[in-house]
Image (tube, rainbow, N blue to C red):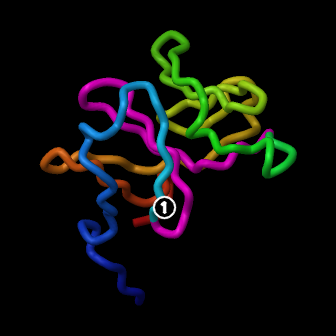
Amino acid sequence: MSSRTAPTEEWHPVCPIGELEVERGVTALVHGQAIAIFRTDDTTVYALGNHDPFARSSAQAGGIAKGIVGRRGDVPFVASPAHRHAFDLRTGRCLDDGHVAVPAYDVKIVDGVVMIGHRKGEAA
């Protein structure tokens, strides 16, 4: 048997939602990882790993938090700053290459504060 921390303790408070600009990314250190956080409207926030898998060097990388936020149909995405590959903000999947993805993280807003959970798809 293994014991795990209660789910409410696995959420990391980042900042008040009002401090995030709409359609801009910021980076935060959460659970020891650099996380790119994007606010797309008054109440919607997404979080992805801040590593650009298409960047060939750390100088070129810059992190996807510096990318451009947009939509393809109903899919909110961020375009990586180095090569403009689009990543689905909901899942982390690359829209231009289905074999590539960045980690996506659970997000919730509690009393106006953005809370980041663990990587989506991890067993609870």
In the rendered structure, the answer to whether residue 58 lies left or right of residue 26 reads right
**Relative to residue 40, is residue 105 depicted above or below?**
below
Viewer-side residue, 107 vs 3: 107
In the rendered structure, the answer to whether residue 48 lies left or right of residue 109 reads right
Residue 113: x and y, percent? 22, 49
Give the amino acid at mark 1. Answer: Leu
Secondary structure at numbered mark 1: strand
**Relative to residue 58, is residue 94 depicted above or below?**
above
Instruction: Give the residue displayed 33% in from the left and 55% down from the top.
Output: 14
Residue identified by numbered label 1: 29
Instruction: Give the residue displayed 74% in from the left and 44% down from the top.
Output: 61
Residue at far bottom of view = 1
Looking at the image, how many numbered discs can be counted on the residues?
1
Instruction: Give the residue displayed 69% in from the left and 31% down from the top.
Output: 81
Instruction: Give the residue displayed 41% in from the left and 87% down from the top.
Output: 2
Residue 16: x and y, percent? 24, 47
Residue at far left of view = 111
Residue 63: x and y, percent? 65, 44
Name the quadrant of the N terminus: bottom left
Residue 71: x and y, percent? 51, 15
Mark 1 closeness class: few <14, some 14–19, many ≥20 residues within 10 Å:
few
**Relative to residue 43, is residue 54 depicted above or below?**
below
Name the quadrant of the C terminus: bottom left
Span shown in magenta: 31-54
Viewer-side residue, 89 vs 28: 28
- 33 inside magenta stretch: yes
In the rendered structure, the answer to whether residue 33 lies left or right of residue 106 reads right
Residue at far right of view = 56
Q: Based on the displayed image, in which of its 4 quarters is residue 96 positioned?
A: top right
- 47 inside magenta stretch: yes
